[in-house]
Image: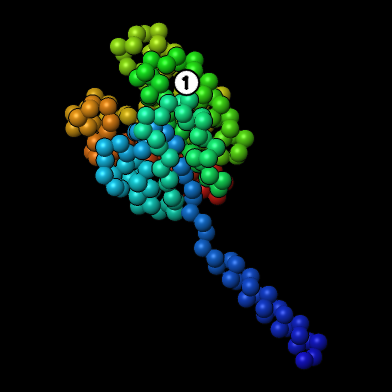
């Protein structure tokens, strides 16, 4: 084979390899829902939980995403901090951080919940993972001092770490007939649908703010 033919053949191979690389399918945008039973889907059947329904809603809007369920029923912010590193795998691009409800229900000091959430946000920032912080609100029966201290955790930390805040994860569900299971705490299937519908625009904005998100 002449030198010119060798060069030409090499060029064709180069173009073929380049075309194969450029046509390789892009990886889906990876989201992890990291929280307690509200994320885990307590009391619900397969595909009825928050992460499954959020993934379906995002895909219906044209987003190529996966939403992993890293919710653990009964988890507190202390438990979440202890398992954060191994529950959020490398390659995760966005975490929906939803913890604090069990701290509140157990009357854990808001200072402890704040410290734990602060550390989690710091760890995720160090790893270069974007966060959407899902807020929680204290029950009125805990008294105004506790309520004010607890409710302030989420906007304060969202501001500190410059992350988007969804003020109340159970917005449109808490206290609404038909939106909760018989325990009066966890969302029903209708409740999850409501949660997903309301948080969806915020999640879409969070995705768009991440390099490579769409």
Q: Position of residue 128 (x, y in %)?
A: 60, 39
Would you say residue 93 is visible in this rendering?
Answer: no
Residue drawn at x 71%, y 78% as measured from the top left? 11
- Please name the residue shown 81% across and 87% down the image: 3
The relative height of residue 108 versus residue 58 in the rendered view (above or below) is above
Q: Which residue is mark 1?
A: 113
The image quadrant of residue 147 is top left
Rendered image quadrant of residue 143: top left
Element on which disc 1 rests: helix
Query: x, y (%) of residue 63?
Result: 43, 51
Where's the N terminus, which quadrant? bottom right
Between 187 and 164, the one nearer to me in the picture = 187
Vertical position of residue 149 compared to residue 175: above or below = above
Q: Residue at x 24, y 36 (%)?
A: 188
| Residue at the bottom extreme of this rendering | 1
Count how many numbered circles sit on residues in the image. Answer: 1
Q: Is residue 51 visible?
A: yes
In the image, residue 4 lies at what x, y percent?
Answer: 78, 87
Which colour assignment does the render follow? Answer: rainbow
- Left or right of 167 in this view: 122: right
């Amino acid at each position: 084979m002449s030198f010119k033919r060798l060069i030409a053949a090499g060029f064709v191979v180069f173009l073929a390899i380049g075309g194969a690389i450029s046509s390789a399918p892009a990886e889906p945008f990876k989201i992890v829902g990291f929280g307690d039973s509200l994320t885990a889907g307590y009391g619900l059947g397969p595909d009825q939980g928050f992460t499954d329904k959020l993934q379906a809603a995002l895909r219906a809007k044209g987003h190529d995403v996966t939403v992993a369920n890293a919710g653990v029923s009964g988890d507190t912010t202390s438990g979440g901090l202890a398992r954060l590193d191994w529950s959020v795998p490398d390659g995760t691009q966005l975490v929906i951080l939803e913890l604090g409800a069990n701290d509140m229900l157990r009357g854990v000091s808001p200072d402890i919940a704040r410290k734990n959430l602060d550390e989690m946000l710091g760890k995720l920032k160090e790893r270069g993972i974007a966060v959407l912080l899902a807020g929680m609100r204290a029950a009125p029966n805990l008294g105004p001092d506790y309520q004010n201290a607890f409710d302030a955790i989420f906007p304060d930390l969202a501001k500190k770490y410059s992350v988007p805040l969804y003020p109340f994860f159970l917005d449109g569900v808490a206290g609404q007939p038909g939106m909760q299971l018989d325990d009066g705490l966890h969302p029903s299937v209708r409740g999850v649908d409501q949660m997903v519908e309301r948080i969806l625009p915020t999640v879409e904005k969070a995705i768009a703010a991440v390099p490579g998100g769409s």
